[in-house]
Structures are given as C-alpha cells and as structure tokens.
Amino acid sequence: MEQPIPSNHLSRANYATIWESVARAVPDRPAVRADGRTLTYRDLDDAAARVAGTLRAAGLGAGSRVAIFLYNRVEYLITVYAAYKIGAIPVNINFRYQGRELADLLRASRAEALVHPTSLGRHVRDAATHETLPGLVLAVPDDDGPTEPGRPFATALDTEPLEPQPLSPDHQIFMFTGGTTGTPKAVAWTHGNLFDSQLFSVYGSLPVGVPSGLDEVTRIAARSDLPPAVTLPLTPLMHALALFNVMNALVLGGCVVFLPSGRHDPSVAARTIGEQRVTRLIVAGNAVVGPLVDVLDSPEGAGLDVSSLTTVLSSGMAWSDELKLRLLTHAPRATLVDIFGSSEGGPFAYGVVRGPRDIPCHPRLAPGAVVFDAELREVQDVPGATGVLAYRGQMPLGYDGDPERTAEAYPVIDGVRYVMPGDHVRVLGDGLVELLGRGSAVVNTGGEKVFPGEVEAVLTGIPDVTDAVVLGTPDPRWGEVVTAYVVTVPGSALTAGQIQEQVGRRLAGYKKPRKLFLVDALHRSPSGKLDMRALRAQVPELEAGQHT
C-alpha cells in the first residue's frame, strides 16, 4: 500500500460544499445510475436541494437528525446529500430491523425526519405503536404497498430547491453502531475530520498529489484524463465502508451504480459490473464474494465480464485467500483490499492481494496503527507478541452524548489520543499481524454485529425456556454465525425450529441463531459464568448428533 496522504487545510471543507462545487464544474457528467435511469451531477444536486428545502420547511436545520431506513437506492444518496446541505445528520438504520428495533433507534437518535420504502412500511407502522414517529415521514415507493405512514418521497421533490448555504466543516456525521453493549450509539465524526481520514482512499492511487484547497479538489474531479471512477456498493449504505466510498466517488466526480433491487442477487451484480464497467466494488468478505464468484465460475458466468474492476474493497468480516484467488481469475487487474477497521475509527491494518504472490494474505499495520500489550507498551515491532490494536490519527469525536464510553474507546496514552475497539492480534514481524478476534463477546456475522445479551433476553422470554446462552462459532461463509444453547422445562414440546422462529419474529433475521441446541442444563460457575471455549468445542459433536 502507498503511504497515506497527509492532512491539510481541506479539513475545513464540508462534503455538501465539495459536491456542490463538483456539480457546478461537471453538471452533465453521470453521477448515479440506478433503475435504468441516469442522474447527472446537476440532477443529483437539484434533487438534494429540493429535499433539503422540504427538510428546512419542516423545521430541520443544523444538528437535526434524519433517519434513513432504506435499501441501497438513489433516494438514500439524495437524502444524505440533502441532510448535509442544511447541516443535518443522517441516521443510518439497518433495513433488517423489526418494528421495535426501529422504534428504539428512532428514540435513541432523536430523529426529526424518517425516510423509508413502502416495502418496509409494516415495520414503520409497528414502530409507531412503540414510539411517536418523527414529524416528517417520506415513503419511497418500491412495491404496491401504501405510503402510510408519511407522504410520497416524490412530494419532497416538488419543493423549491434550497440555495447553497454556508456550511461548517464542524457539522457532524453519525455512524450508529451497537458499540460493545448492543444499545445503539452514534460514533460522531465532523465533516472535516472524516474528509481528512479519507484522503488516501480518494487520492492515494491517482497521479495528482495532495489537493491544496476546494478549487483544486474541483479541478481534479473535472479532469477527463484520469481513470474512470465507477463505484458499485454491494454492501448496504448503512455501513461505513459503503457510504464513505460512495461519498468519495462523488468527491472525484465519479459515478455511483446501484443494483435494481434491495435484495442482493449475485447474478445481477455480475451483469451490472460488466454493463456499467464498474471499476470499484464494495463487498463484505466471503458472504458477498462467495456467491459472486460461484456465479462467475458457473456456466452462466461464461458470458459475464468483470474485468473492468480495478479495486475491490472489503471490511468487517472474513475474506478467505481461496476466494480472493478465484475472484482474481475473473478480474486480473483488480487490487483486493481487506480493510481492518471499525465504526469507531481506523483503519488499523490492510490485507492487499494483487496476485498469487500475495497469498497467504496477512494484514499489514496501517500508518498510525500500533499494538499495545497489557501494560500499554507498544509491541508492534516484537514478533510473537500479542496485544490490542490501536490507532492514532484522524478519528471521530467519540460516541455522541456518552463521554464515559468515549473515554473507554478513545483513551489518551502518554498525551496521545487513540481509538481502541478491542481487537486482539499476534505480531508476525515486518509490520504484519495475525488477527485473534474481538475481546468482547460480540458476534460478527456477515459484517453485522450481534450482541448475545439481546438475543438471550428474547430466548429467555419464550415460555418454557429457562436458560440460554448465545455465542459466535466459526463459519466459512459468514465468518461467524449466531449459535445458541437453550434449556427448556422438563417435558416441554418446544423444538429448536420453533424457538428460532419466535426469535425471528422479534429480531432482525441476522440475529436469529443459525445453530440452536436444546440441552438439559448449562453448567454455570457460582458467579454465573460459562466456559465459552468448551461450549464452542461441543458444536461439531452436537451438529453431528442432529444429523444422525
């Protein structure tokens, strides 16, 4: 990897200001392609300005929160841009949430507006039984369902466009995450700090040097001699990797491509890459790459061309060397980048593969990343040492409204502020590390965080269930899967499938245990603790017993 570009006074810029400047420079260039239509930069800016006018008319302004409960769609990007235009803060909401989960996040975020698709309207209506909805609700039609609650998104486009406003680089951008407890918390960036942290991602591979100000950023975006930047996020925009890279694409005057459906179809994705000549693909490890490569390797894949890919970015879950090599046979010019970061900041390390010579792929510490041992001594230069990853550099302000948790995740050590989410590594030498996992019990399944306590509370609330424990167990596709051990009252007729079904009615699908074992007892210590290592070790035997 090239060395990161140092920060400069561009940190005093705001994303909406940058995009408005790019739109004035290249108004007729394609900005977004989706659903068979193309929005130019002029179109995108005009739509965002009209929605911004609607938000302003509803009383929203700097610091207001706009909840986005959407699949990857052009309306998602328009809403983000519109919020930025008035200094408001988009709130990323997982489209897999059920009604109560949605209500919890609307309450936690203090949202003043909500944008949702009609296909998820039932969850919004359910949320309304638990929490008063924001005063402005806009519904994006993506099925034949009713727009209630709310009014059609198209009505927001009838508003007079809001003229560009003076915007501060200190306006905030939130990424909601469960942190370490499962309670939704917002990691708060400023526009300026986030832009500084993204300079390498935006400009590191281009022969342009460091832009010295907004005028130069705009000139670079307007150049026609640079490689095309066509970005397709296969992962949801509710995650930082996808959203930030889409934002970066607009900084460069590039084009963002969205699939026609919120449901990921690897065949459609492969065709779209070829048809749109996508250069940058955003994935989530094995869970996304596996099905895509399976299609490309199949007879159907003989007519599919993904050779336009020059960069494939992944973060948040396992991506096997075997799948990296299989993808490279179809996209030989691509550089595969496995980013080890977190919602709280980073990046901490990169795994980079350009060909078979880079296999096995070991992540290399990013500039600014260190490894601390238990005594908070730096040991990243000590082969064989183990410790916790930390990063010093441009980072978020912390958790919004939670100074205690901010102090825990962003400690100041010897006068330097770090971000330390709790990832343990073993030092291999020459800047390479081996990831050992998160110190907490959080389960990372397909890039989604699942907090055992939340699932355990639902399990133990089911009649006839007397005890339960939830943990993550390894899985070749998803990295980890949610696994549960459940104890029921003697003689209960409850089956594992019935329990899984009841959990699925209360929680998002990815939180439902994929593996669930009914056991006679969980042997806890006097303090209530369990031997989690022993429980994980029992899984293969219990699975074998289920199939005999």
Image (cartoon, grey):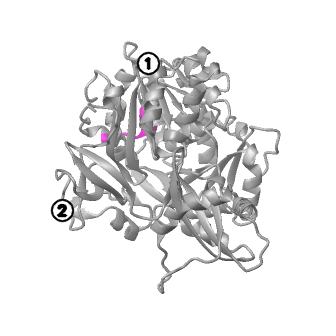
The residue segment tinted magenta is 11-18
Q: Can residue 12 be seen in this view?
A: no
Q: How far apart are marks 1 and 2 (CA)?
A: 44 Å
* Residue receiving disc 2: 377
Question: Front-most of 242 and 336?
Answer: 336
Instruction: Give the amino acid at mark 2.
Output: Arg
Image quadrant assignment for residue 253: top left
Image quadrant assignment for residue 351: top left
Instruction: Give the amino acid at mark 1.
Output: Pro
Residue 170 relative to residue 427: left or right: right
Residue 94 relative to residue 8: left or right: right
Image spot of residue 472 (x, y percent):
52, 59
Q: Element at badge 1? A: loop
Instruction: Work out which residue is located at the far top of the displayed protein and give it.
Output: 225
Image spot of residue 286 (x, y percent):
51, 40
Sequence-wise, the earlier of marks 1 and 2 is 1
Instruction: Work out which residue is located at the far front of the displayed protein and give it.
Output: 548
Q: Element at badge 2? A: loop
> Mark 1 packing: few (<14 Cα in 10 Å), some, or many (20+)?
some
Q: Which mark is residue 533?
A: none
Image spot of residue 405 (x, y percent):
40, 67
Q: Quadrant of the C terminus?
A: bottom right
In this rendering, the answer to whether 185 lies above or below 35 is below
Q: Which mark is residue 228?
A: 1
> Mark 2 packing: few (<14 Cα in 10 Å), some, or many (20+)?
few
Image spot of residue 115 (x, y percent):
66, 47
Q: Is residue 12 magenta?
A: yes
Magenta segment, prevailing SS (helix, strand or loop): helix
Question: Front-most of 173 and 242?
Answer: 242
